[in-house]
Image (cartoon, rainbow, N blue to C red):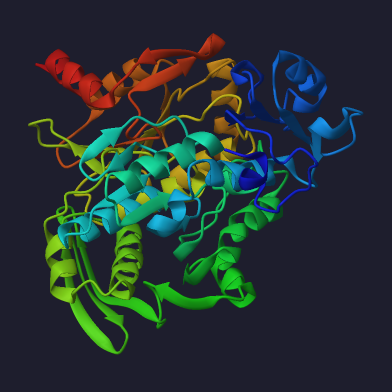
Amino acid sequence: MKLNDLLENNAVTSVGDTEITSVTDDTRKVVEGSLFFCVKGGSFDGHTAAAEMLEKGAAAVVCEHDLGLGERQILTDNSRFLYGKVCSAWFGHPERRMTLIGVTGTNGKTTTTNLIKHILMSAGHKTGLVGTIQNEIGDEVLHTENTTPMTYDFMALLKKMADAGCEYVVMEVSSFGLVQNRIGSSWFRTAVFTNLTQDHLDYHKDMEDYYQAKKMLFDICDMALINTDDDYGRRLYSEVNCEKKSFSVKENADCYADGIEIKSTGCRFCLHADDKDYEITSRIPGMFNVSNLTAAISVCLRENIPAEKIISAIAEYNGVKGRCEVIPTGRDFTVICDYAHTPDAIENILRSVKEYTDNRLICLFGCGGNRDAAKRPKMAAAAAKYADRLVITSDNPRNEEPEAIISDILKGIENDKIPYDVVTDRKEAIFHALKIAEKGDIIVLAGKGHEDYQVLAGMKHIHFDEREVVAEGMKLLD
């Protein structure tokens, strides 16, 4: 493509007729005729390699300040932002060929996006999914590394979805993806806000910075659907300028649930939306899932999906792997696997499970290494609110000492009388939880969810699937 065609008047250059063979912000991928973007990252600044990239064959470089490289440098205020725009153009703007629905927030994104996709697919609309667990094109499953893929990869994925005939794309939109402009020129028909609780403060300097990152999504959408049960949601609702609707499971809103009944086998409630009432039955339990269901139904009603198809699709939906997932044991106690890895998420899952626990609620959890250390004691305090016993262990320690992470966790229950056990090795910790389980107990394995690996020192990934570990542990009990 011609350089001018890629820039689409978003930057000025005197060599606009130059033929571009590829676009990249990765020095390793520069070839003859590449357009190289100088992006400043956490450990490397692409500006330092600009001259070298021209020598390597790049047709031009995009930079944020004058590097003295003459007409082959293109100046811009924000290289990341322009890179997103150019990647969109490079793939022929696939984001314009489909209806995009985005979901952001700390918790609930995965379940909400999967629910929306399931409803749309059940109604006959081929739909793409961009998410934490995996990406999907209709029924085809694709592996993913990031919640929001990197810019070039994201646009390549959207093109693949559009070419495959997808009408919709439902995606989890992370704060990283928004701040780093990974989503290019994407515009969302509906943007959903689930909630905001402490997470990723190793990246964002504070909660205000985290909130402002999430808020960016609501500058690029037609309508905002916002959870006003959440403090940040109420603030967001007062600040957004686009069309907006509220949803709630606690009080009246534009879309709200009441008459809520929750059991271990699922939930029932009445949804009120657009002056109509809908009786909803779902196989996924938990008050937090009632909120996720309310959001998903509201989105699909806006897309004019017939109510009877929405209700039918939800009734047959079994849930997302690693989200309040029951792991079969064949015993008189229950094991639930959940991705909860923030204080709010662990409190939500335990509060919900507590409602249908016949005996004790045992919570096993750890905290990730090289991540926000401030949330570690808060995780323990949150777990202690509803659990009857804790098993404290590891969860992706990465390059930190697991014992040091556990020491941070224990500070959150120094003044609490809740009984707890420390078993550093997560596999042994699960065996221990199974061993101490009694009739009617529920064990919640929190933190790993869908993940089938552990990240150890040196960033080494080892296979670790809690479903397999539980199965192995059950054999040891025989």
Residue 131 visible somewhere in the drawing: no
Horizontal side, residue 10 vs residue 333: left or right: right
Q: Residue at x 59, y 69 (%)?
A: 236
Viewer-side residue, 221 vs 95:
95
Q: Residue at x 53, y 14 (%)?
A: 459
Q: Name the quadrant containing residue 124.
A: bottom left
Q: Quadrant of the C terminus?
A: top left
Q: Is residue 401 above or below residue 8?
A: above
Q: Quadrant of the N terminus?
A: top right
Q: Is residue 190 above or below residue 364?
A: below
Viewer-side residue, 5 vs 240:
5
Viewer-side residue, 409 vs 312:
312
Q: Name the quadrant containing residue 251.
A: bottom left
Viewer-side residue, 429 vs 305:
305
Q: Residue at x 28, y 42 (%)?
A: 137
Q: Position of residue 341 (x, y in %)?
A: 46, 39
Q: Position of residue 440 (x, y in %)?
A: 16, 42
Horizontal side, residue 404 vs residue 11: left or right: left
Q: Residue at x 18, y 53 (%)?
A: 264
